[in-house]
Image (cartoon, rainbow, N blue to C red):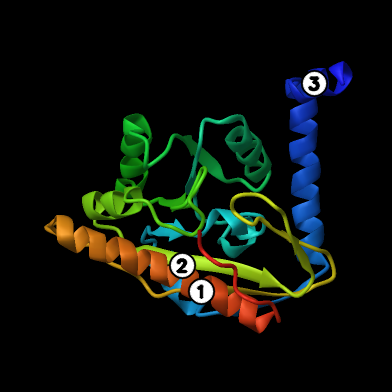
Amino acid sequence: MKLIKSLTKSNGFRSFLCWVGAQYIRLVYLTGTWQVINGDTPQQFWDEDKPFILAFWHGRILLMPYCWNRKKNIHMLISQHRDGQLIAKTVGHFGIQTVEGSTSKGGVQALRTMLKALKGGESIGITPDGPRGPRMRASNGIVSVAKMSGVPVLTCAFGTTKRKHLRSWDRFCLALPFSKGVFVWGDPIHVPKKADADELLAYQQQIEDSLTTVQNTCDELTGHPPVEAA
C-alpha cells in the first residue's frame, strides 16, 4: 500500500499515466468509425476564425479532444484538484491548453484568462457540471462568461456503441475500442450582454437542456438509454 501511495504521488508516474490515457483515447478513436451530426455549425466558426465557448458534460470528457479542430487553439477550464491536473496533462498531449480554476467557485483569475482568450479570438472549453457536480446540471459560470464576452455557447457530446459507465458522480463514459461512434453538436446559444438575472437563469437552463439533448441523441444513436441527471 505504501508503494502504491508513493507512486500515485510521484509526478513522473502520474505523467506516465496521463501519457497512457492519451494513447488509449487515440486507440479508441483510431479503431472506431465516426459520424458527426451538425458539424457544419462549429465548422462555420472555425472557417471564419470566430471563437466560441465549447460546452459538454463532465462525464463525456474522454473523446472530446477529437471533436475539436486541431488547427484552432482552445483553452480548457480544469479544476485545481488533483483529478483536474491529471485531465490537464492528458489533454495536453492533444495540444489543448488549460486554465486552472472553476466558474462556480470564484475563480477570478481563471475568468480573466478565459475572457482574454476569447477577446483574442481563441475558444474556451467548459464542463458546466464540473468539477464535482451535480451531474448534468449547469452552473451559472458559463452564462456569466458568455454574457461578459459576447461569445456564443456551442454544446457537444459523443457516444459509442461499446462502452462502460463508471460508478462516479458523473457516470463517466468509458468508450471502448472498435466501436461505432458519433459526435453531436448543438446550435449556438447567444447570451446578451444586457441580460438581467431572470434572463440569465433562462439561458442557463437553455444551455443545460441543449447539453442534455445532444448527449441523449448520442446515446439513442448508439443504442443506449439516456443517463439521468442528478
Please give the name of the residue rendered at 59% of the width and 53% of the height, measured from the top-left corner: 170
Determine crowd level at label 3: few under 14, some 14-19, many 20+ residues with C-alpha closer than 10 A. few
Q: Is residue 146 left or right of residue 79?
A: left
Percent across and percent down for residue 11 are 73, 22
The residue carrying mark 1 is: 214
Residue 184, relative to residue 95: is it above or below? below
Relative to 224, say whether 61 is above or below.
above
Residue 192 point in image, percent of width and height: 18, 62
The label number, if any, that marks residue 211 in the structure image? 2
Q: Secondary structure at mark 1?
A: helix
- Work out whether residue 100 or residue 74 is closer to the camera in this orientation and state it: 100
Sequence order check, earlier mark of 1 and 3: 3
Which mark's residue is nearer the viewer, 3 or 2? 3
Q: Quadrant of residue 47?
A: bottom left
Give the secondary structure at mark 3.
helix
Q: Position of residue 45 (x, y in %)?
A: 40, 67
Q: Mark 2 near mark 1, Cβ–Cβ under 8 Å?
A: yes
> Measured from the top left, where is residue 117 in percent x and y?
37, 44
Q: Residues within 10 Å of mark 2 (few under 14, many from 20)?
A: many
Q: Nearer the viewer, residue 172 or 178?
A: 172
Badge 3 amino acid: Lys
Q: Image point 70% across, 52% down: which residue? A: 167
Mark 2 to mark 1 CA distance (whole Å): 5 Å
Label for residue 5?
3
**Residue 192 appears in view:** no
